[in-house]
Amino acid sequence: LRGHVKQAGDVGVGALRDHAGRLVDGQQVVVFVQNVERRRDHGRGYTEFFSTRNGTLNSAQSNNTLILASSSPRRRELLTAAGYKFEVVPPSDAAECGFCSGESPEAFVARLARQKGEDVVQRLRAAGRAEGVVVSCDTSAECQGQILGKPADEEHARRMLQLLRGREHRVFSGLCVWPLVAAEPRVVVEATVLKMDDLSDAEIDDYLASGA
């Protein structure tokens, strides 16, 4: 889908560097994942875990395995393209849902990113796993005060696209990095201001029919 990045900065994780996303990837809204501007750090006590040069973990974490807590093919593609070696342990379905009334978009993606990471961390610890760094993410768009998460079906996705077309909107990505040896994770939120082209109904229908 066509659009323009209106406001951007540098992302702290190399896996997202210079990599354009898509508006609907299956049923996951991943609107134009681009270089983004860091808005808020929801954690404490950790420096960068990643080396953006060689796709490995830094210093003290260098002997640990990177564990992606996601079932998204797109997130796997991003990490693989950036050269990271990792395992995939998807979170349970219950960890990927739940919107709290009055919650801001920043708080929403931060909470869900942590929720997914915590689910995988607890399961791995229960299985006796002591080493590894769990990485989990959540991405949502916000337009005219509405938080746009996962569309329930194609018609829901169509309504989202009709809302977004021709308008500026913000995309929030929450990232949770949780070493299994740590009591608490580091959670950061990134944001990008975007504007989608003013697509016609026919163009939206064609996009949805393509399965892209």
Image (cartoon, rainbow, N blue to C red):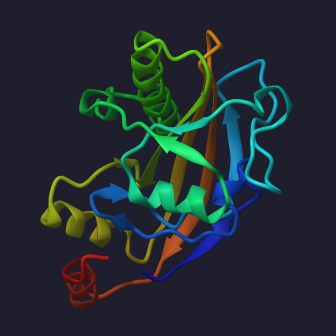
Looking at the image, residue 196 lies above or below residue 83: below
Q: What residue is rendered at 15% in x and 59% in y?
A: 153
Looking at the image, residue 25 lies above or below residue 109: below
Q: Quadrant of residue 60?
A: top right
* 1, 178: nearer the viewer: 178
Q: Quadrant of the C terminus?
A: bottom left
Q: What residue is rendered at 75% in x and 35% in y?
A: 49
Q: x and y percent of residue 12 in the render?
A: 75, 47
Q: How many marks?
A: 0
Q: x and y percent of residue 67 in the render?
A: 54, 36
* 185, 130: nearer the viewer: 130
Residue that extends furthest to the right in the rendered view of this protein: 59
Q: What residue is rendered at 65% in x and 56% in y?
A: 15
Q: x and y percent of residue 180 in the render?
A: 59, 18
**Drawn side of residue 79 relative to residue 11, left or right:** left
Q: x and y percent of residue 202 in the render?
A: 21, 90
* 139, 92: nearer the viewer: 92
Q: What residue is rendered at 42% in x and 30% in y?
A: 116
Q: Quadrant of residue 167?
A: bottom left
Q: Quadrant of the N terminus?
A: bottom left
**Drawn side of residue 211 relative to residue 108, left or right:** left
